[in-house]
Image (cartoon, rainbow, N blue to C red):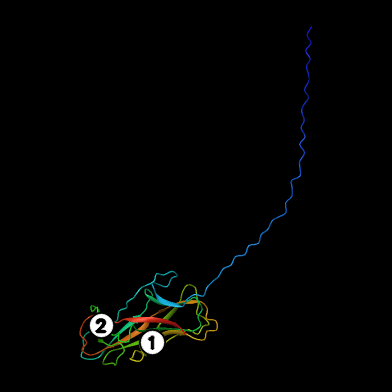
Amino acid sequence: MRFLKKLGIGAIVVCLFGVPATAYAANTINIQLTQTILSGVLSTGFQAGTTAGAASVINPSFNMGAITTSNAEQTSHGSLSDNSKLLYVDNPGAAANWSLTVGLASTNAGWYRSSDSAKTRVYYANGTNAQGNLSINPAVASVTDLNGTSRAGTSMALGTQAKLSSGNNAITIMSASGNATPGLWRGGIAGVALSQIVPPRTPAGTYSLDLTTTLTQT
């Protein structure tokens, strides 16, 4: 007789014991950044509006009031700089002393026919009343702080009315002097008044005069 022997297989129990993980110390590295900020450069120009980032206006033109031919002296009025073609000063380097002037593009510059490429002078901007003379009055202009800057507490001031002459071909529009804490400033100057005496018997036509702005750190 064959005997079958059954072997009972008991449950296999596996015990897993946690093995402690290796401990590591924190590794900290200090980092230092270095930033160099260079002093900005004093500059001037014209921009299209009063908002930050307004586009530059290259070689802007401004119209004087129309007059008619006459046997007597006449005066034509105009304005230099407006909010669409705004004259500005940018002082990102906080220069304490500077001067902005407007004057003739050259000592021999005068009013010439706009169609004349040679720019032959017909009448003067820096002569006698009989020759023609331009008066510039920055005192009536308005000044607007731009880009969130402020001129409060500074000695910036508009210039006074003056005439161009053979010995004075440029007029001070605005200046700053002796600012202990001038600050970084950008500002627009609008509405500089212009008055041109036109000589008697000046022929009818359209005339132009070339001016330049100059910003000087003094």
Which quadrant holds residue 127? bottom left
Q: Position of residue 30 (x, y in %)?
A: 65, 62
Q: Quadrant of residue 136?
A: bottom left
Does 122 sit left or right of 36 as displayed? left
At horizontal 38% and vertical 87% (from top left) the residue drawn is: 171
Marks 1 and 2 sit apart, C-alpha to C-alpha, by: 21 Å
Circle 1 is placed at which residue position?
171
Say what secondary structure mark 1 lies in: strand
Foreground pick, 173 / 33 = 33
Label 2: few (<14), some or many (≥20) within 10 Å? many
- Which residue bears the numbered disc 2? 112
Q: Position of residue 108 (x, y in %)?
A: 30, 86
Please tell me which residue is depicted at 28% across the width and 85% down the height of the picture: 110
- Say if 63 sits above or below 128 in the image: above
Disc on the earlier residue, 1 or 2: 2
Q: Quadrant of the N terminus?
A: top right
Residue type at mark 2: give it.
Answer: Tyr
Residue 169 locus on image (x, y percent): 35, 88
- The secondary element bearing badge 2 is classed as strand
Amino acid type, residue under disc 1 in the picture? Ile
State the mark number for residue 36.
none
User: Relative to 8, is 168 above or below?
Assistant: below
Pick whichever, 216 or 111, lies toward us: 216
Q: Is residue 100 shown to the viewer in this render? A: yes
Image coordinates of residue 27 in percent, x first then y, are 69, 56
Describe residue 136's horizontal placement relative to residue 91 as left or right.
Answer: left
